[in-house]
Image (cartoon, rainbow, N blue to C red):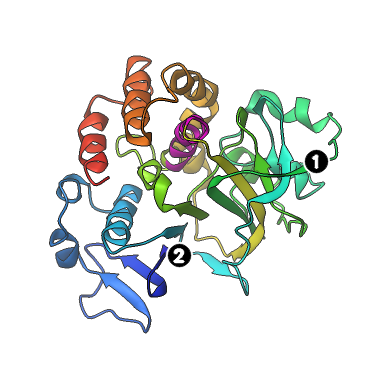
Amino acid sequence: MKFAGIHGWQLVVVGDTKTPKDWSLSDVIYLSPDDQMRIESGLIESLPWKTYSRKMVGYIYAFQNGAELIADTDDDNIPYDNWELHLQEETDTIEHPGFVNIYRYFTSEHVWPRGFPLTDIVKQSKTAIKPLEKKKMSVGVWQFLADEDPDVDAIYRLTCNMPIYFNKRANINLSAGTICPFNSQNTFFRRETFPLMYLPVHVTFRFTDILRGLVAQPILWAAGYVLCFGHASVIQKRNPHDYLMDFESELPCYLHVKGVVEAVQSVVKNSNSISENMYAAYESLLKVKIVEPEEMGHLERWLAHF
């Protein structure tokens, strides 16, 4: 992940228990396991090692060191030139209540983002894309795409798995009420929306960032922000995966995506802060058994930072 603070962009690497203690690289902040445990936080000690949720250590470090913008990424994404220079707020806007397959606006290929409802894929593929109107909105989160091996689900990879190269075009804002899953591969959060970066600990690896993105969107709308998508600014040379294992890990994506949004929308209030709405959202998800009771303690410790 990278963060932008008063000294410009800095790259933060969160080490695991196998990373050599003398690992170093120019212009990179490396947080060894010992360094992580010295960060003032009630959350870090409780995060399991060798899990995706430990990315939150880097988020906490960046927030505590004055970050104004955090770019969340993975180690198999290679940035194109000027990848960070596309954070427009006045751009094309989709106003379509419910889920929208954002990939359709960047390619004619039959492909969809991980976490997109399976029941909507064919239906939307048969619907014509209408011209978009340019509007200025307050963007809370920017999700940029990835060329070659984008963030698709295991069903796509098991049945097609063709490389995808997206068209270059203007960013697209999703107006309030318009939903699309977003991930943690090439995603920018402004400081005001940092509480939404929480990665659920007690869910599967392939569900955690998708759940985060689904929870975030109704809360963004309540706070006066929207989600924005941009064309590919990285190329992904994907690390080896077992696609059947990915499929198993993605089962909650296929089964609970619409239920997550319904549960969150039922409790989010415009009068609440982002942190208050986050807690209410997870209480609602707990009631419908999409998250486990153990999640609430981690969430409380996370929200204590803001």
Secondary structure at numbered mark 2:
loop
Decide if residue 95 is on the left or right side of residue 240.
right
The answer to whether residue 285 of the structure is visible from this angle is: yes
Which span of residues is magenta-colored?
209-222
Tell me where residue 295 sits by quadrant: top left
Q: Earlier in the sequence, mark 2 or mark 1?
A: 2
Circle number at residue 298: none
Is 206 situated above or below 281?
below
Q: Residue at x 46, y 52 (%)?
A: 189
**Which residue carries the number 2 mark?**
75
**Which residue carries the number 1 mark?**
132
Q: Amino acid at mark 1?
A: Leu
Instruction: State the residue lying farthest toward the bottom.
Output: 26
Q: What is the spatial separation of the Cα atoms under label 2 and label 1, in whole angstroms?
A: 34 Å
The answer to whether residue 159 of the structure is visible from this angle is: no
Q: Residue at x 72, y 41 (%)?
A: 93
Is 256 situated above or below 80?
above
Is 43 situated above or below 234?
above
Q: Position of residue 235 (x, y in %)?
A: 62, 65
Decide if residue 146 is on the left or right side of residue 305.
right
Q: Position of residue 134 (x, y in %)?
A: 76, 45
Secondary structure at numbered mark 1:
loop
Q: Nearer the viewer, mark 2 or mark 1?
A: 1
Q: Amino acid at mark 2?
A: Asp
Q: Position of residue 58 (x, y in %)?
A: 31, 59
Q: Position of residue 143 (x, y in %)?
A: 57, 50
Q: How would you classify the magenta stretch by its main secondary structure?
A: helix
Q: Nearer the viewer, residue 257 or 148?
A: 257
In the image, residue 42 lies in the stretch drawn in magenta: no
Tell me where residue 272 sits by quadrant: top left
Q: Residue at x 14, y 59 (%)?
A: 37
Q: Residue at x 35, y 76 (%)?
A: 28
